[in-house]
Image: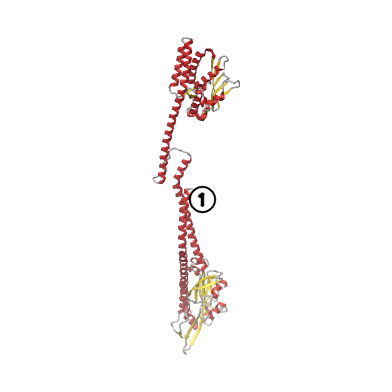
Amino acid sequence: MKSWYKNRGISFKISFMFASLFLLMIGVLTFILYNHFQKTVNESIMSAVSGKVSDNMSQMQSLLERIEISVDLVYDNDTLYYEGDAEIPPICKMMLSYKLEPGNENVPPLIEEYESNKKLFNDYFSACFGSTGTDYSNIIFVDTSLPIHRFLVRHTGFDEGNGFRSSANIQAADWYQQARQLDGDIYWFILPEYETRLCMAKLLKHAYIDQNRELQVQEIGVLTLSFDIAAIYDRLDIEGLTSGSEIYLVDREKEIVFSSNQQSAFSQLLEEQYTWQEGIQEAQYEGQPCQIYFKELPMDLAIMSVVPLDDIKSLTSDTIRIIFIVGIIAVCVSVAVIVLLAAKIVAPIKRLSKHMQAGHAELISCDTVGQDETGKLYRAFNTLMTRLHQSMDDTVTAMEKQKEAELRALQAQINPHFVYNTLNSVSSLALYYEKQDIAEVVDNLSKIMRYSISSPNEMVPIRTELNIIKEYENIQKSCYWEEVAFRYEIAPEMLDFLIPKLIIQPLIENALKHGLDHGEGCAEVRLITARKGDEIKIIVWDSGKCADVEKLNRYALGVDSEEIKSSSIGVRNVWERIRIVFGEQGSLHYEKDEEGHTMAIISINGIEERQKEGNVL
């Protein structure tokens, strides 16, 4: 692990360090907040659910209170009257007193009273539902013991209008008998033919004291109210509860009057475990903990909400999961920002590193860096490169001076030797001839001396070197008459090739010596130039066959430096000057041709590159 981290780049290390610190901080804060937040969120959700349950209970209580008030306005069953009491509510009073007089003289007043009470009856219940557009029906099925029932319609349905009807055809119905058995208590039910309507029935009884001061009870009929179950849904906020929660309306017999779910999941729980007591009750259903919110309502009903605690935990988990997701996103964004910032910080260092790895010695621009540590590093690099350039320039200057001194020293070795030999020749001429030829020889000699002394380190074209060689040829012919023959095989395009001064003349002088030594007629020396591809050869050929090329090569290389004769000093100097000027691309060596004649060969490579640099032609 340590080795792996050590081999990473600085950008990765910065990103890794900050990301690790950030993740550690997030982990610690998450651990601390999670324990506190879980409890807080759980209590908050429970409070929200409780508040929503309370709102639903209040809505249902308000609706049932209005219905109860409307029923009591018709007749409350609890007030005791005296026979003939004028304080009896008008609707029930009409039911009890409605009868025709002899001759039907009271028919118009009866009809008027009927219509007035019917409108009053309808007004009571229209106030319950207001202008919500709820489909409802309020009907009193009048007992057959009252005379008025003979004048009423006998429809049995709950969807055929409001008002008063005869109970003649409905008394056998189960719901009607159930309402009579409850003796004034309210009976809630749903008929199969009206699955979407919730129905209520209440027996109306008139209790009074007769003239004999005895208590009498007379049945008036059964008051019914039916309305669309949607009226309850409209008042309940099911969405405000958990997904598994359910709301019930139950009566005192633990019968479910209404359920928010047609397939009630907790019907058995309600029948077995809850008690008729307001508040919050804990219960277990199929191993699942639940909370039952219970509130007693008017008209012998109660509203109950069953909330599975697992739903609360699920909501808590969902909330915490969302927080974790947001946290992870925040971490990812933060890590991305850290990586980008690290990359931005490291980018100038990488730029400097690439510059150095590429081997560039020039200065690097500091425009993109400031005055921070990176900027100091850039400026320090430029200072180092400046000093390095200065040191290299000083080294090059010193080397050039050293090379120039070496060339001067080499030429100083060549020139005296040449002058010595030439003066011997001039002396010989003077002894034998005392003619004008001496003047020509001296003139040729002066030209050679002047050429060798002026700018000794200069690079000259072969054309110029050839002129001096011809001056030397004139001197040699003056000395040896017809015994020396010079031939020049130089391609015209080679005449402008640049070479150091006086690297061919010493070789010709040495070749002439070999040519005269063989003692077989006229000596011949040839100067040949040739180019093959990227290489140039300058060949000095002589007709002599007695030269030891192996010894000459050793002389050129300095292997037999202690045995070098004065006449071979020029060969060694030529080789050294070639290596100084051309380096590894220049060489000098001796070899024999097929007939045994001696050849001094100067080889120079890299011609095309030198032509591009202007150092050749």
Farthest right residue in view: 594
Residue 348, quarter of the rendered image: top left
**Front position in the image: 200 or 280:** 280
Q: Is residue 344 left or right of residue 554?
A: left
**Front position in the image: 192 or 307:** 307
Residue 72 location, x and y as percent?
46, 78
Residue 615 location, x and y as percent?
48, 27
Farthest front residue in view: 562
Name the residue at 45% across, 80% down. Answer: 89
Residue 170, quarter of the rendered image: bottom right
Picture mark count: 1
Residue 117, above or below 7: below
Q: Is residue 176 left or right of residue 438?
A: right
Q: Which residue is mark 1?
A: 3
Q: Secondary structure at mark 1?
A: helix
Name the residue at 48% across, 13% down. Answer: 428
**Front position in the image: 255 or 321:** 321
**Front position in the image: 470 or 214:** 470
Residue 220 in sight in this render: yes
Residue 435 location, x and y as percent?
46, 9
Name the residue at 41% across, 46% down. Answer: 373
Q: Residues within 10 Å of mark 1 (few under 14, many from 20)?
A: few
Residue 191 location, x and y as percent?
56, 73
Residue 493, above or below 302: above
Residue 190 in sight in this render: no
Q: Amino acid at mark 1?
A: Ser
Residue 139, above or below 452: below
Residue 331, above or below 249: above
